[in-house]
Image (spheres, rainbow, N blue to C red):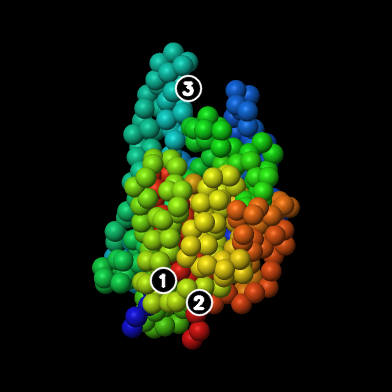
Amino acid sequence: MTDPVVVTGVGMVTAAGIGVDAWRNLLAGRCAIGPVRSFDTGRHAAHIGAEISGFESPAGAADAGRATAFAIAAARLAIADAGIAGAEGVSRAGVVVGTTSGEPAFVERLEDSRAAGGPSDAALRDLAVHYPGHVIPARVAHDAGFHGPALTIPTACAAGNYAIAAAVDLLRAGRADVMIAGGADAFSRITFTGFARLGAIAPERCQPFDRHRKGMVPGEGAGMLVLERASRARRRGARIHAEVAGYGLSCDAFHMTGGDPAGSGAVRAMEAALTDARLPRDAVSYISAHGTGTPVNDRLEAIALGRLFGDAARRIPTSSIKSMIGHAMGAASAIEAVVCVLASRDNLIPPTIHYETPDPECRLDCVPNAAREHEVRVAMNNAYGFGGNNASVLFRKWES
């Protein structure tokens, strides 16, 4: 590709911290999962989550929903990192945000007001103004002063990677010069209740790929990347973190919540990403796993990796930061994309914590319990969501 799409800025808001603090804490293997504080979980069997504590909405976003505020905060970090604040060409700068639930808190507030005697005018107004899915990228665009396309991608837990793919397409096609792409979701009663009723939430901790894993842990946050073509980045003297080498998308077309037991859809997405990047399988040096910690999903992911990489799947470092920050839904793969970029930049891989007992059905190098120094030339970021949505994005180390 003569003018590759590159990453010039990153920002993340996570339960492990914000920006560089999050990266340091992830490398340190610090667990940000604990008892749910924002609502009563007494009616459920599970009581843990990965909530962001001490977060304050950015200036100018006090009225925004929590996911929107996360998105704005992460985008500001990415823009500052990229050095494009106040730069020319904002009419051709756009935003793509992936989300699973948008702003469900406004639905919850409406239901609370109904239970208290009838829907209040304030609850109805907030629902109309803040809940619709288009609000998050629109508010990010307004905050950044970007006048290009503003899109919402609602492909469940793969939405962050889908958003990055959509932004890459717009840049490759010459329809935009700069894109902010990522994902945002907030912790909510609605999401927690859904997973609790599925029996999918772990009782104490998240243990991806461990033989005794018992489930996932809901989380929240946002991850944003500034993407542009390499020629533009060079002209303005930008620091380039990594190249978005390629992506692949697929659908299992199998079940609305369960994945294809053979892992075929995940394999297709990874193969498509490698084809798009014109890279062989043995070029991949780190895999950021979807790694939710549920018995079925982790096994399916391991099967898919084994089908694609063969015996090499046991040797490629493959970690899941969900063991530390839970599953941030539509933001998960966007945060993990930021981690892939930083891993390739710094040659450091964050660990999978709480990994104690190898599972013979998940024969992977899970980078257990401690970060690892490792040359990351190509990082693969995998995300799999309800509906069978699969998305793999490849980030290549940038060498000027």
Residue visible at 39% across and 83% down?
Answer: 235
Instruction: Rate crowding at label 1 as few (under 14), some (14 to 19) or many (20 or more) other CA atoms within 10 Å.
Output: many
Other residues around mark 3 within 10 Å, as few (<14) / some (14–19) / many (≥20):
some
Label 3 SS: helix
Horizontally, residue 128 falls left or right of residue 104, namely: left
**Residue found 56% across the figure and 50% down from its top:** 298
Residue lying farthest bottom?
A: 400
Tell me the residue at 26%/72% (across/down): 174
Q: Earlier in the sequence, mark 2 or mark 1?
A: 1
Dot 1 amino acid type = Leu
Q: Amino acid at mark 2?
A: Ala
Q: Position of residue 66 (x, y in %)?
A: 49, 42
28 w.r.t. 297: above or below: below
**Who comes first in sequence, dot 2 or dot 3?**
3
Disc sitting over residue 274 in the figure: 1
Q: Is residue 299 left or right of residue 30?
A: left
Q: Residue at the location (51% across, 76% down)?
A: 282
Residue 258 visible to an observer of this rendering: yes
Give me the C-alpha separation between circle 2 and circle 1: 9 Å
Which circle, 1 or 3, is nearer the viewer?
1
Nearer to us in this view, 120 or 347: 347
Q: SS of the residue at dot 2?
A: helix
Q: Quadrant of residue 107?
A: top left
Quarter of the image with the N terminus is bottom left
Residue 169: where, in percent of width, then height?
A: 31, 66
Real-space CA distance between mark 2 and mark 3, rounded to the nearest whole angstrom: 52 Å
Marks 2 and 1 close (CB-CB < 8 Å): yes
Which secondary structure, mark 1?
helix
Residue wearing tag 2: 283
Q: Nearer the viewer, residue 104 or 70?
A: 104
Pick the residue in front: 222 or 263: 263
